[in-house]
Amino acid sequence: MDEVVALRVRPEPTRVPLLAKGFRPFFLLAAAWAAVAVPLWLGVLGGHVAVGAYAAPAFWHAHEMVFGFATAVVAGFLLTAAGNWTHRETATGLPLLGLALLWVAGRVALLVSSSLPPVLVAAINLAFIPALALAVGRVVFAAKSRRNYAFVLVLAALWTAQLVVHLDALGLAPGGQRNGTLAGVDLLILLVLVVGGRVIPMFTRNATGAVVRHVRPLDAAAIASVAALAILDAAGATGRLPAAVAGAAALLSAGRALRWGGTKAVGEPLLWVLHLGYAWVPIGLALRALSAFVPAIAPSLATHALTVGALGTITLGMMVRVALGHTGRALRSTSPTTIAFVSISLAALARLLAPLSGPAAWLPSLHLAGTLWALAFVLYLVSIGPMLLRTRADGRPG
């Protein structure tokens, strides 16, 4: 993103560095929530913690990972990137603070939902994505940045998926929690395919000199297949059709990455973490396809390969890279961030192995995965968090 989002936009003056660019508050919030929400979920599973009465505990966990944590990362990326794509600022200062507080309000509303009317809980949570889409869309459409219109459309689709989830919680759309959550994951993976296809090969080429190549029809087919999967999941399709689409998407998404210079990235943590995060996409999609034919492969394996593996790993890698580049620091991974990358990778592996570990080891395996996940984001907060609170090291705005 540092190469894509060139520093060409001079933000509105603000005395608070945290509010100078969208990545600052939202990456900080995303990391903090990732480090807190998963241990909370483990407490729920152990019967030690309650998370409100709005819906079943599993609803809270799924919603907060997809529409809480991941959406905050998306917000930080798009608010920063869209301003530089269009040479127009999206949100800084008080407007950015308002967006951040709106996101926080959604997290709090679910935690204290026992004390609030259910409709109010839904309304608070459903307010953030439209506000984000407005902040991004107004500059993208005003600048006629047609290449980036799709990001606003994906935000609209993501909000629709969240709406279906909440309608289910309100008793108005049975099955909406499953359909909306799966569609939400698909849409986030769609963003990974689009953004990853733009930046991963470019970062690799710029850092290593590797010869990379884009096969445009293959790129388009991979993106289209995941978009089709999102539509099928939103419609509640089950059985062999979505499995076949997932299988095709796995092959296409893997095939397009073969010429991205992944072997050249092995020695550089800021590169291999992105390649590894992307690799979880075809793995998760392949597991999704196989789960329809192999009873031993639970659908949850695919879900967690795509969420903990792909989304967790690639977002952490991008959050480190963007923070370093956009606070005027060298693009070098330190020991804490490298350990964080390893930790998130091990968390994904441990989460996938948990269902296979047997009843006695299932909960301990989940605790291991959750601890490794939380450790990765705590390390981010400790090593990168202070940079987000300070002015740029090179004295430039942003």
Image (spheres, rainbow, N blue to C red):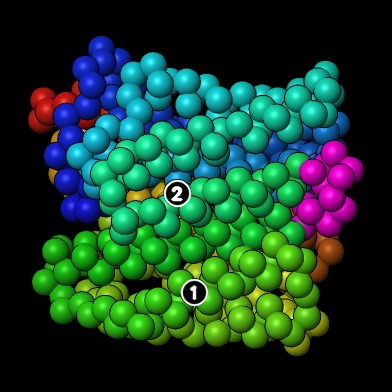
Can residue 130 be seen here? The reply is: yes
> Which residue has dot 1 on it?
224
Type of amino acid under label 2: Val
- Part of the protein shown in magenta: 167-178
Q: Viewed as shown, does residue 341 lie left or right of 172?
A: left
Where residue 219 sits, quadrant-wise, is bottom left
Can you say which quadrant of the picture contains the C terminus? Answer: top left
Please give the name of the residue rendered at 21% of the width and 17% of the height, measured from the top-left corner. 13
Q: Residues within 10 Å of mark 1 (few under 14, many from 20)?
A: some
**Residue 56 on image: x %, y %:** 85, 43
Q: Is residue 361 left or right of residue 93?
A: right
Residue type pointed to by label 1: Ala
Q: Is residue 337 visible?
A: no
Place of residue 335 in the rendered image (x, y in percent of width and height, measured from the top left):
30, 47
Q: Regarding mark 2 in the picture, which secondary structure is present there? A: helix
Residue 266, relative to residue 258: is it above or below?
Answer: above
